[in-house]
Structure formats: C-alpha cells, structure tokens
Image (tube, helix red, strand yellow):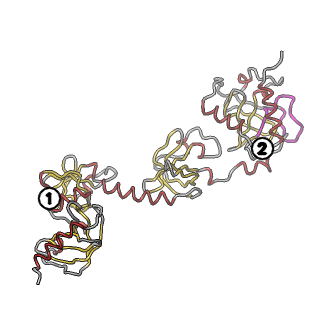
Amino acid sequence: MNDPDEDFAAMFEASFQAKRFERGQTIEGTIVAIGPEVALVNVGGKGEAVIEIDELKNAEGVLEAAIGDRIQAVVVSTRGGLTLSRKLARGAASVRQLEDAFHAGLPVDGKVERVVKGGYEVRIAGQRAFCPMSQIDTSQSADPAQHEGHVYPFRIIEYKEGGKNLVVSRRALLVDEQRASAVEFRRSIVAGAVLTGRVTSVREFGAFVDLGAGVQGLLHVSEMGWSRVSDTSQVVTPGEKVTVQVLRVDDDTQKIALGLKQLTADPWSTVPSTYEVGQVHPGRITRLAEFGAFVELEPGIEGLAHASTFSPTGRSEGWSRSVAVNMTGAFEILSIDPEKRRIGVALVQEGSVRTGEDAPSRAEIRPGARPTGKVDAQEAEEVREYTERKDDAPAEGFGSLADKLRGALKPREQ
C-alpha cells in the first residue's frame, strides 16, 4: 500500500508540469487532494495547481471545501508552478497574499478610512495603505471626504518593506474598465448612426464631443451648419448635450467624424424649384477672394460673383474698392448647378436689370468694412473647391459661366 504522504508529494511535484496560464486569469478547477498546508486543484492538462488551505477556510477557520469540489480562483503566480488564490477572486486578501496581488496586478478590496495630507488612508487586509488624491477617481472631487467609509477595489502600485509600505490606486482600475468599455462601444459606432453626446471642448476648427465610455468624436466647423460658421462658440458650448450623426469612422486612426447640419433639411434641396437663371435675389457678401466675392442668397445658399461682374465694362481691375464684406444688394442669377452646389451671380448694376416684376432698379448697398485684398489659406481652399470641382457631366449653364470667368482672368489685349 502506498504511503499517502508520498502520493501527495508526487502529486505536488506533478503540479509543476501544469500547463501555462496568465497571471490574473480567473479559472475553474476540481480539488483532487488536500494536504496540511496546500491543496491541489485539477485545472486541466498534465498537472495540478496549488492553493493554500487557508484559502479554503471560512472566517471561523473551518475548512469549507472537500475533494471533488469545483472552485473558481485567480492565477496569482506561475513561477515554479501554478498558484491560485480563491480569496482574491472574491475580493478579499490576507497580508501574505498582497505581494502576489502586487506582482499579478490583481485588485484587492480596501476601505477608505480617512483623508490625509495628499491623499487617503486605506485599510487593506489589516494593513494601512496610502492612496494619492489623484488616484482615488478618474476626476477630481469637489469634496474629498465623500470617499471616506467606502470600500473600493484597489490595485497595489507600490509594495515595500514586506507589505508595510503600500501605495494603491483605484484610478488605475477605473481607467482599465473605461478602456475595455471604450473598445466595445467604439465597435458599435458606425457611419450614419445618430448619437447623443456631450461637448467637452470647443476650438476654432470645431468641437470635441464625448459619445460615451470615453469615446470622443470631432464635430468640424464645416459640419455645424449649412451656412458658414465664423464662431464655433456661437453654435455649441462646453458641457452642452448635443445630438449628432456619425459621418465617418476611421478604423486605423480611431478617429470619428461627426455632423450636426445633417440632422436638418438641406437648403440646396429646394434650389431647383426656387431659383432660375435671370431671377434677381437680394444677397449679402460674406467673403472676398482675389477673383470675386461669395454672396449669401439665403442661409446655407451661397453664390459666386466674379470680379468682372462688379464693373460695367467687364474689367476686373480695382473691383474690390467698390465692395466689402457684409454689403447687401441685388444679384442676378447667371447659372445654377445644384449637383455641384454652385450658383453664379452678378451684382445688378444701374441700367442692367432685366425686366420683371420683382427686379429692383438698382442695388441697394450698405457699406461695411473695406477689404484688405488678401486671401487667407482657408478662403483660398474654399475658392479652389468651389471653382475646380469636377463632374462627369457638368451642367451647361454653369459651364458657360465658368468659360466667361476663365476668360475674364486672362490678360486683356491692349
């Protein structure tokens, strides 16, 4: 008959052949042997894992497990074999388990005793630990004392003097949870989705919107409204709750583009039925470029008036001296291309108005600030997009205007 102690020693030796697991991994196994100090747990493979007997006792010190029982435990060490902790899996810990928890990065429960200088005193497994003020939460609290008396899971970030000097962090665990949630939430975001978020910051180029779980998207200034937005802070403010549409999701850069104007009617959808060549509409000059001016006919609808159209002779020299941003007047529709979102217009000059019931006799211009004659980089890009956008089948009306504009830009023969 085999000696039970020898059998147990052989099984203990076999535990070193257990298949590899990751520290911090929660696994299940069956208790196959119980010794004076440790028990062996079959977790699959050729060997068994080791768990201390104290891990299987209740608060009164009574063993509450038997051979054949299945238990759930956390891998706290893989050095020289597989070591498990059942108490860590349940959020409890003893002093001698804290070092394993530190090396494995496992959470341990601690009670916030009181606020001290620079942070909090936390009680973990009978030991005092220090949690810096910045590590108690992901955001700073207006009342630090609100955490006193609460039991939180903490991660041990410093372990010194045999466990007598502990520094812990709750924030580290919260950040990990947020990252895991963010990954799952980001996967659920697709182009076209309509989401509600909160504005976190507003810049000249747009606003950042928190969509949830720490996932942010950019609401670019060009997507805030159908009309040109000159001041983003007039559209959204930090902390404001907004509903936006997801325009694009870049899987490589993890960037999310958002839109606000897409949730309202596109004013260009009514252009074919409300605008005709030859009509005269009131307009306001919004921007000046080297070769002409952009004219707002209604919110979201802009036309382009070439420099030559501001002169009765058709010459473009010195045209900017007679116009300025925010000047209003009557403009004749020269061409319309709804697909390219282009409308060619010309300021109505005295004696050049076409007949019609609604056509004014002359432009009523209210002067504003005089232009400098310079065009910034953003305006230059907008002009380029407006004038150089190509299509497989350009509209005949606008093509004729484009030919005229190109002709007007060529040096004139003396």
Q: Give the dominant element type of the magenta stretch: helix, strand or loop.
A: loop
Give the vertical position of 25 relative to 9 (above or below): above
For badge 1, the amino acid type reads Gln
Give the vertical position of 99 relative to 364 (above or below): below
Residue 294 at x, y percent in the picture: 70, 34
Comes first in the chain, label 2 or label 1: 1
For the C terminus, give its image quadrant: top right
352 in the magenta segment = yes
Q: Which mark is residue 127?
A: 1
- Range of magenta residues: 343-361
Q: What residue is pinned by disc 2?
A: 337
- Farthest residue in the front direction? 1
Q: Is residue 211 left or right of residue 49?
A: right
Give the vertical position of 197 relative to 376 (above or below): below
Disc 2/disc 1 C-alpha distance (Å):
76 Å
- Circle 2 residues within 10 Å: few <14, some 14–19, many ≥20: some
Q: Is residue 222 left or right of residue 138?
A: right
- Disc 1 element: strand
